[in-house]
Amino acid sequence: MRKTIFTFALLLGATAAEAQLPGLRRRSPAPPQQQQRPVLQGIDAQRAEFAAQSGGTTVYFGAENVGLSVAARTVLSAQANWLRRHPEVVVRVEGYGDGGDTRDHALAVGARRAEEARSYLVLLGVPAAQVSATTWGKERPGLGRAVTVLIR
Amino acid sequence: MKRTILSLALLGFGSAAVAQQQPGQPAATVIAVPPLTSPNGGNQGNEMLAVGWQVTQQIETDLRQTAEVMPLQPNRDDYYSYPEVTAPSFSKWRAKGAKALVTGFVQARQDGRLTVGCYVYDLDKGRELARKGFAIGPKDWRRAAHKCSGLAYTAITGAPGMFDTMIAYVAESGVGDGRTRRIAVMDSDGYNHRYVTAGDAMVLTPRIAPKATQLAYVSFAGGRPNIHLIDLGSNQDRPLLPNDVMSFAPRFSPDGTKIAFSMMTGTNSDIYVANSAGGAPQRLTTAPGVDTDPSFSPDGSRIVFESDRGGSQQLYVMNADGTGQRRISFGGGWYGSPVWSPDGEWIAFTRRSQDGRRIGIVKPDGTGERVLTNGPGDEGPAWAASSREILFQRAGANGAAGLARVALDGSGARPVTIPQGGSDPDWSGVVD
């Protein structure tokens, strides 16, 4: 599992808009053969395709804000299109709060952002069972005011 | 300070010792702690005196941690005989500047256990304030000392002592996203430190049940925040709710039978209450937005919580059934993580502004707000059983979290020593 996630992070690093995914960068370095092999299979390939065809996996929010911007809706629409074509793929929306906030308020804000993005995906026709939501609050501070949509 | 004198006067003891203080002088009541004696003779008597000396030194250590009581350094030359436990020389200790005195004894019992007796005196009035006797295991002298310290502290201040109490917190090792977080518990003096979760999942906000029988916390073991309960005797762990819903910010009711918490329903975080034994939760708030961090009043009749329903994060008080919700914080900035004091007088909070987070207190009716710490990375207050001190999380210069404590009397915050980094502290009531 750890290896899989790391591969995903590397891949996103290669796509322009996704240079930062600190929440997914794990302790152990990637095995060297992973970096030399361009052909991805299984969940890694799915993640790469999802990120490429949706314009990214990360959706950003304004300060103290849980509403979806136009840019956020654009990304989520593309994600919804892809997810409708891949009903076998299950995703989790992970929400992040603000680093300066208190612990539980940040958890709640991250959860609201994740649920906001999740319900927009469902509104666009993604089956509710295909997408779940969670929050990291301020515990993984790298992303700031955002949600990531992660294939599980 | 005015409140201290009032409560002492009501209780009818110790008032003389405190009332003589002048402005500008230290507020602490000086107390003499000569070594405990023993009625036993011979080798056994020597053993008991050795235990008594350990107890005496621990009492001194306990009382020195407080802002209100200042112990004189115990001296082995101040040995007294067993009859003098109940007939001490008041003039001797008055001459050394003490206002109060602790005497006591350690006695070997037939069953191998020890009887410890403690007596507290008002030296100015020359009379006994309190006494307590109890049997302990031969190795439990630290516990005996905590009981004597609590007896003296309560006799002098009128407030419960916090010596025989437990602290829980999130122990953090490593840095950044890869750091390991485990729930740790320890006696309030730092002894008996142990970890109660394994460190394989992220954990947050341990909250100790009354009497410290169990502990509620938030586990990310399933990838989402879920409230769990750990039995501190057996270490058995179970989720509070049957379904995998996002739930967090648990707090026990004062009688331990209920837990208030927040739970996500769609994009809405609301306050719920459930029996700690299990069962369907009851919803207490319905406002759109974030309602979280509920904390019961000590009589269980009201709940303080935070909400951003008015546009920014503020403190609200409601009845325990959810009725009568009203805002109590109006000082500017954002307010969070409210906790009701054990004596019911204050609500501690984290106040957030552009230049950081600080710990403060306010009356439950919204008056008398005071900020107690300088920040900039303070949060998560937890009350001492005495209601005169607050334990909280303080981010160090390098960003690593640690624990600190601050007294309500205006003296500065002091760091609390723990074996590694720590966050989210909680402080139990008196364990007995």
Image: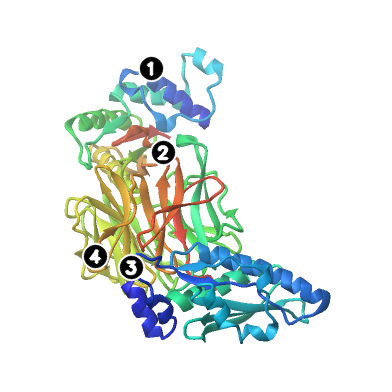
Give the percent coordinates (x, y) of residue B299: 36, 76
Q: Distance between the residues labelled 3 and 4?
A: 21 Å
Which quadrant does the C terminus of chain A fall into? top left
The one of B407 and B120 positioned closer to us in this rendering: B120
Dot 3: element: loop
Q: Which chain carries label 4?
A: B
Q: Name the residue under label 2.
A: B397
Is residue B56 or residue A143 the one in the foreground? B56
User: On the same chain: label 4 and label 1?
Assistant: no
Q: Which amino acid does label 4 sit on?
A: Gly
Residue at horizontal 27%, vertical 39%? A117
The residue sitting at 24% across, 62% down in the picture is B316
Measure how far apart labels 1 and 2 are at the Cα level: 34 Å
For discs 1 and 3, the disc positioned in front in the rendered view: 3
Give the number of the mark in front: 1 or 2. Answer: 2
Q: How is the image coloured?
A: rainbow
Q: Say yes or no: labels 1 and 2 on the same chain.
A: no
Task: For mark 3, name the chain.
Answer: B
- Same chain under badges 1 and 3? The reply is no
Mark earlier in primary sequence (2, 3)? 3
Disc 2 from disc 3: Cα separation:
35 Å
- Give the residue at mark 3: B23
